[in-house]
Image: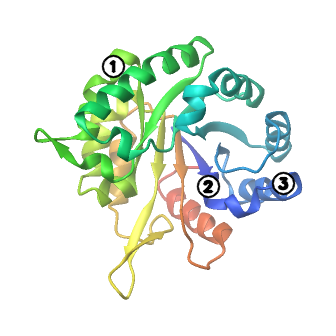
Amino acid sequence: MAILGVQMFTLRKFTQNEADLAATLHKVRDIGYQSIQVSAFGPIPAERVQQLCAEAGLNIAATHVSWDRFRHDLQRVIAEHVRLNCKHTAVGMIPPADYLSPQGLAKFVSEAAPVIRDLQASGISFSYHNHHHEFQRFDDKPWLQKLLEQAPSINLNLELDTHWIVAGGADPVQWINKAGGAMPLLHLKDFCLDGDNKRRFAAIGQGNLNWEAILAEAAKHPIEYYLIEQDNCYGEDPFACLATSYQFLARFGLS
């Protein structure tokens, strides 16, 4: 069964120095989460991040790293993951202006191949995290579908994000079915509508996604980590939001 973790972008205001990070990690573990995905931390050495996670009883499931660093600072990225004792990484976003086209897709696949090769040589998997814009269609197929079709040739995984799939007009259940065999990481993210009918991020179970169907499909695949993320809590305590998400998912036997 997949392990529940927190995508730490949710708590980015509380991870900019060692003291805040240490306190934050203990709060995350106290909620019940067992792992984290490193994202948007302050300038804290990888060794200290790993030590603070170990002291809090958390493992580091994965990271998010910028595409620029993957392309131009890869050996340092690899060294950091060795220090973090982390076996998975993902790119949070690639610049749509450069890559969101058939020609841009070919460019990304070409650039990603040597990055993935070197990461895998060090025992680290690489995943692509989607937003909504990858569901723009080219030649009657979404860009993300075209990427998925080429993914096996370069050992590329997907890190699907349930919120952004729906925001792109697609079905998370269908996409988990498509990618589940090559997806060690899955982002669980919900959304609702506010009084002005604007889409708002929500704690898991407090929005409108069909979690019974999503989790039933996800359970069919060898996904290692479900990572909970809430990009914006709109003034609510993000720790309370993460606790709400955890309590909802616990009803499905997840922890």
Q: Residues within 10 Å of mark 3 (few under 14, many from 20)?
A: few
Q: Residues within 10 Å of mark 1 (few under 14, many from 20)?
A: few
Q: Which residue is mark 3?
A: 17
How far, Cα to Cα, is label 1 from label 2? 29 Å
Q: Which residue is mark 1?
A: 152
Secondary element type, mark 3: loop
Question: Which residue is pictured at 47% across the width and 54% down the height?
Answer: 252
Secondary element type, mark 1: helix
Residue nearest the viewer, comparing 191 with 4: 191
Q: Which residue is mark 2?
A: 9
Residue 239 vs 219, above or below: the answer is below
| Left or right: 100 in relation to 157 | left
Q: In the rendered structure, which amino acid carries the disc numbered 3?
A: Asn
Residue 164 vs 85, above or below: the answer is below
| Left or right: 152 in relation to 18 | left
Q: Position of residue 196 (x, y in %)?
A: 35, 87
* Quadrant position of residue 168: bottom left
First in residue order: circle 1 vs circle 3: 3
First in residue order: circle 3 vs circle 2: 2
How far, Cα to Cα, is label 1 from label 3? 39 Å
| Left or right: 102 in relation to 85 | left
* Quadrant position of residue 174: top left
Q: In the rendered structure, which amino acid carries the disc numbered 1?
A: Pro
Chosen colour scheme? rainbow
